[in-house]
Every structure is written in C-alpha cells, then in structure tokens.
Amino acid sequence: MRRSAQRIVKRSVEGLWIAFANLNMQQKLLIVFLALVCLPLVMISYASSYYYTRSLKANTTAYATEITSKMLIQLDDYVTDLYNMSAMPLYNKEFLKWLADPDNSLVKSQGMDLYITNLNKIKPDTVSVYVFDNYGHIDSNIKSGGKRNNLAQVAGEWGKIAAEGDGKPMLVSTQEVTTDKEAYYAFSVIRQLKSVRTDLSPIGFIVFDTNVTAISRQIRDVDAVTKGKTILVDENNKVVYDSDGALTTHDLSGDESIRRATGDRGAFPITIDGKDYISTYAKSSLTHWKMFVYIPLKESTRQAAVTRNLTLLTSGAFVTIALIIAIAISYALTRPLSKIKTLMQEVQTGNLNVSFNQKYRDEVGMLGRHFNIMVTRVRDLLEEVKLTQTRKKEAEYAALQSQINPHFIYNTLEMIRMRAELNDDEEVADMTFTLGKLLRYGVNHEEQRVTVGQELDHLSNYIALQNMRFSNRYRLIVDVPQRDREMSCIKLMFQPIVENAIHHAFKDRLDGGTLRIDVRHEGTDAVFTIADDGAGMDEERLKALREHVAGQRALASSGRGIGLRNVHERIKLQYGEAYGLQIESREGAGTEIAIRLPARKQIEEAELC
C-alpha cells in the first residue's frame, strides 16, 4: 500500500514536471516568479492575518470571561445587600413586637407602614415589600403600579419557602408580575422572621420584590461594548434575565450552552441562528446562578478583518505591480527567443531568406548570431546540393538513355538480319529507312526534351517497323488532341512501354493485338494512358512488376519491366516524386499503364526558373 502511494506521488510529480517543462519560457518565468515572490508574500500575509485573528479571539475570550466574573460578583453584592435588608427587621425590637401582636391597632399599622416604607427606599430597584404575620395580616409598601394580582396565590408558596429557609434568606427566581396598572419581571428575596426574646419561634416573614432592571443596569454597559447579549439562569436552568427580553422565565435545560457549561467558569464557541458567537460563562457561589455572555464573532474580529483586508489589499497591490513588472521583464527576455523560433519556423517551410537582428551580446544575441551563420551555411549547402543534383540527373539521364539505345539497336538489327535471310527484296530497304529514322531520333542527345507529338511520331515509326516484321499484327490507336501533342515531355517515353507490351502482352498471340493511347487531365496534371488487350497478369506478378518499377525489387530473370523502370525513373528525375508510371492489369483482360506529367504551364515555369 505504501509503495503504491509512493508510485502515485512519483507519477504525479513527474506529470507536473513534464507539464511545466512543456510551457513556453515566458510562462515558466512567471510561474517561478509567482512561486518565489508572490506566493510567499501571500502566505505571510495570510498567516499574519490568521494568527492576529486567533490572538484577538483569545484576548476577547479572556476579557469576556473576566468581565463575566466581575459582573457576577457585582450581582452577588447586590443580592447580598437584599439579604442584609431582609435581616434588618430582626434588629428592630419594636417592629418584632408589632409583628408578634395579634391585634391590628392603628399605632401598629402606622409604625409598620413607616418602617416598611423606609426599607423599600434603600434600593432603587426594589418594587415592593410585603410583611406577613402568623395571624393573616399583610403589610406592604408598593412604589408604583399597585399590588400583585396573584398575591393571594403566591403568599402560600412564599410561606413554604420562608419555612424551608428557617431564618435564612431565600432567593426566588424571576417571575412575571402583573398588577392593575402594569406588568414587569422581578425576582424575590424571602426571609422568615423569628422572635429574638423568647424561643426564636417564627412570627412571620418578609418578601422583597426587585425589578430585573437591577440586573440590566449592571449588564447593559458591557453589552454595548461587546455588541452581544447576556443571559442569567438559576440553578434550575430557568432564565432569570435575558438582555434581549425574549427568553426571560423560559426553561433552557435542553439548550446547548447549558450542556457545555459544566464548570464554574469557562468559554466556548457556539452558533445561534446561523451566527457565530464566543460564549463565556461564570457561576455564582452565592446564588448558584450562571451568567452567559455571548459576543458575536464578527464583532470581536472586526478589527482583525479590517487589518486582514488592508493587509491583503496592500499585498495584492504589491503583487499586481510586481506581476506587471515580471510580465514586462519576461516578455523582454523571451521576445528575442520567440523571434528566433519564428525565424526557424520560416526556415522549416523552406524560406532561407531570413536573418535575426542582433542588438545585444548576451546569450540570446550570440544564439541569434550563430543562427544567422547557420542559415547562411544552409543556403550555401543547398546551392551546392542543387548543382550536384542537377549534374547527377544529367548523368543519370544520359546513363539511362544509353541503356535503352543499345538494347533497341540490338533488337532492330537482329530483326533486319532475320528479314534479310528470309527475303531479299525492297521491303528490306523500307525497314532500313525506318530504322534510320528511329536511330537518328534515339541517338540525338542534344535535346533531352521533346513534344508529345514527336514522341507519337517516333512511336508510329516503331510500330510500322514491327508490323513489317510481323505482317501487320499490331494496331495502334492514338486519341490525343493537338493541344496535348504540343506538350513537353522526356524523350523515349512511349516506345519502351509499347515495346514491353509487344514482347510480353502479345508473345503468345499469333493474331497480334491492339494498343490505345489517350489522355485526360486531373487538376494541373496530364495523364497519358497506354492500354493493350493482351494477356494481362495475375495479382502476384502485378505486385512484383510494381515493386520492380518502383526500385524495391531486383530485375526479374525474364527481363520484363526494364523499359518501364527506365521511363519511370527518368520522369521522376525530371519532374519530381509526384510523377511517373502507374500500372493496372488483370489476367486475360490486358494491361493499362498511366503516365502522369505536369501540365504545360508548370513545365514552362520550371524551365524559366
């Protein structure tokens, strides 16, 4: 498995390197510049922004945790003051005497009202103070809004809570208080009051209702700084205070913040309604309430975002300027190389009349100088090769022509000898005359090119000589227009092909045969066709003959095809590889040989060049 992974990594690296190596020089320079300059700059900017944001988050978390603890201490101090206020009646003997008295005299009522009113003035956020005795009497002082609508119902609950406290202050979580005039949220402090003269028996209890604005006053300044919100929950996870006001008195037992706040203080990230927050919490040792402070992550990292954006903008500006400079420099460095590449492509197409303008003496300038020297040398060599090829073609043409003439003369003389032995009459004179004309045409080496008409006249004399020998066994049909007869061609082009047909196509036929010559035009080429109605040949012999004519196979023992190969090679020497002979044959259906030549206009242009 490990080796397979290593091979995959190796192939990936090799693939990347090959892709890089195939890029042009300008692209390589830009990639190297980006890798060595731009990429480190961007990475440094990103790393700086990342660690700055991370540090800012840590500092914000530490600050928020500390602030949460301090706010909770202030809240504990406030609750402690309420606890102390609830104990103040225990130090007033007269108040305890009135509370223990079952009679509800005017003096008692006025005295208790005055005392309760003074208690209610100590803290600005205490809304009401209720005093209950053991005889069903209720004394109270209400700052505004009137008494609770549910006082009768909660009195029993308060009595139970006071009894549970047994003289200690008891804290009741926030409840919604409704009166005839308004509704508000308040939390309560309850203490059972006992007689200090006798056996410390309970003589009643006192209740302080405090508006949650007492908590809000301490928290709102912090929320204004953090742009977040604060939630205070009691030991039963019931919301005592919510700075948004939406969750007050709600039970948050299943909330994620409650589940994650397992210690006495701490911090954790949390997402609420799709927004990210840093949440810090602290637990009060006095009330066992927990305070949660939620700071929006976006607000806490706003300065980091500004710094990051400014850093990235500055880095981007520098990278852009540097990239423009790099592009300009890489273009200046690679432009001469591109010029040399273009010139080489011109040379590749055959244009050697190019030259590199050498301005500087650096490596590229020296390369351009050697390129000019190379092109000059190539031009000189091509001129030498051209001259050599011309001389070689002349020599090969002369050699090929010399191969034909002895062969033809030998056959003709042998024919005259045989005729002379058989018949000593005027026919010999005619044959000798015709032979003279053939010899004069063939041995004249001054003119290497003739017209198609001259070739056809020469072929007519040859056929006439053969018909004298074989009693008119051969019929020649020529269908070549006059305009094509004026076309230029090589000498001895038709006669070797016809001679090959007579010796091989009709050798087993006593009644001779017919040969037909016609012409067609294909584009700028003229194609002359010599067709016979002889024996033809099978696929195997046709393939062997084609390979022999093309120079891919040695001459057959029968000598068949020597004239065809001779004509094919001479045409290629004169006109190029695109021209020559094409042979088609079918056994029992004759043979057709096509001669492809360039049209007259191209020949004349080639001669002028």
Image (cartoon, helix red, strand yellow):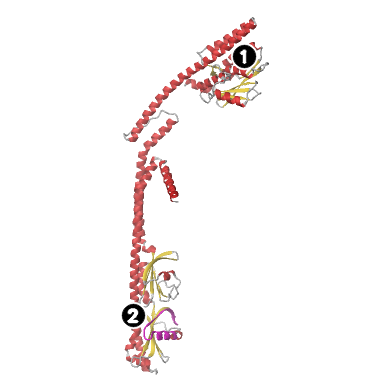
Count residues near mark 1 (Cα–Cα under 10 Å), then give few for <14, some for 14-19, many for 20+. Answer: many
Q: Residue 463 carries which label?
A: 1
Nearer to me, 124 or 355: 355
Q: What residue type is labelled 1?
A: Ile
Q: What element carries label 1?
A: helix
Residue 197 visible within the image = yes
The total of numbered circles placed on residues is 2
Magenta segment range?
Answer: 156-183
Q: In this view, does 134 lie above or below 431?
A: below
Quick one: which residue is furthest to the right in this view? 511
Nearer to me, 233 or 208: 233
Give the residue drawn at x 44%, y 64%.
Answer: 274
Nearer to me, 436 or 79: 436
Q: In this view, does 267 lie above or below 563?
A: below
Nearer to me, 406 or 362: 406
Give the residue drawn at x 37%, y 64%.
Answer: 299
Q: Which amino acid does label 2 sit on?
A: Thr
Determine which quarter of the picture holds residue 243: bottom left
Which is in the foreground here, disc 2 or disc 1? 1
Residue 100 image offset from top left, x and y in percent: 37, 92
Residue 278 visible within the image = no
Count residues near mark 2 (Cα–Cα under 10 Å), then give few for <14, some for 14-19, many for 20+. Answer: some
Q: Is residue 199 above or below residue 45?
A: below
Residue 162 counted in the magenta span: yes
Residue 92 image offset from top left, x and y in percent: 32, 89
Q: What element carries label 2?
A: helix
The residue at which mark 2 appears reads as: 80
Residue 440 image offset from top left, x and y in percent: 55, 10
The earlier-in-sequence mark between 2 and 1 is 2
